[in-house]
Image: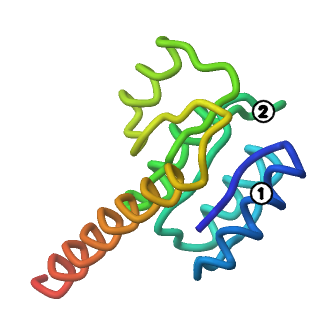
């Protein structure tokens, strides 16, 4: 799991709770760092802040599709707008969540996103094995 957020406190809190619940967590403090990590490693799920300096979360989502088709990305934001939510959906975000959010909600979304990502991997593996 990749956690992308420019707020260190939030990254650390998510890392702590996700790790305690059995997730392997990698952190990225910026969109640029997130894209490097998405290009270097295969992730099932990413939590991505929408508003970050430099490359924002929507741009990370847009560019990530060229790096990994099966990574499910849950967008999170402290300033939700209908426009950003619609753009996230158009770009293929798994979900769009407003801050503050409950950890229960995040864990529920992560489990659903993980199932979808793993189903995509099985389908890719079956397709690759058939060639």
Q: Give the quarter of the figure containing the N terminus.
A: bottom right
- Residue 37, placed above or below residue 24: above
Q: Which residue is rendered at x = 30% and y = 62% of the image?
A: 116
- Residue 104, placed above or below residue 48: below
Q: Position of residue 131 (x, y in %)?
A: 13, 82
Among all residues in the image, which is located at the extreme bottom? Answer: 129
Among all residues in the image, which is located at the extreme right? Answer: 8
The residue lying toward the viewer, choosing from 97 and 67, is 97
Among all residues in the image, which is located at the extreme left? Answer: 130
Mark 1 residue crowding within 10 angstroms, few (<14) / some (14–19) / many (20+): many
Q: How is the image coloured?
A: rainbow
Q: Position of residue 5 (x, y in %)?
A: 76, 46
Q: Earlier in the sequence, mark 2 or mark 1?
A: 1
Q: Position of residue 53 (x, y in %)?
A: 83, 30
Q: Secondary structure at mark 1?
A: strand
Mark 2 residue crowding within 10 angstroms, few (<14) / some (14–19) / many (20+): some
Where is residue 118, by image quadrant? bottom left
- Residue 64, placed above or below residue 90: below
Where is residue 79, by image quadrant? top right
Q: Which residue is rendered at x = 69% and y = 64% of the image?
A: 37
Q: Which residue is rendered at x = 74% and y = 67% of the image?
A: 15
The answer to whether the residue labelled 2 contacts the one labelled 1, judged by CB atoms less than 8 Å apart, is no
From the viewer's perspective, tell me whether residue 80 is left or right of residue 4: left
Residue 52: mark in rendering: 2
Q: Which residue is rendered at x = 63% and y = 45% of the image?
A: 48
The residue to which callout 1 is attached is 28
Q: Give the distance between the C-alpha atoms of the residues marked 2 and 1, in whole angstroms.
A: 11 Å
From the viewer's perspective, tell me whether residue 10 is left or right of residue 86: right
Q: Position of residue 82 (x, y in %)?
A: 47, 12
């Amino acid at each position: 799991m990749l956690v992308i957020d420019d707020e260190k406190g939030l990254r650390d809190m998510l890392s702590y709770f996700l790790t305690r619940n059995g997730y392997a967590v990698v952190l990225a403090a910026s969109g640029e760092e997130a894209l490097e990590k998405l290009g270097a490693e295969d992730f099932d799920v990413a939590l991505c802040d929408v508003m970050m300096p430099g490359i924002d979360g929507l741009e990370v989502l847009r560019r990530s599709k060229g790096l990994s088709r099966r990574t499910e990305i849950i967008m999170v934001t402290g300033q939700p707008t209908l426009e950003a939510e619609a753009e996230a959906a158009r770009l293929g975000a798994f979900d769009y969540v407003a801050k503050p959010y409950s950890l229960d909600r995040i864990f529920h979304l992560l489990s659903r996103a993980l199932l979808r990502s793993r189903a995509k991997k099985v389908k890719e593996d079956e397709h690759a094995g058939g060639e």
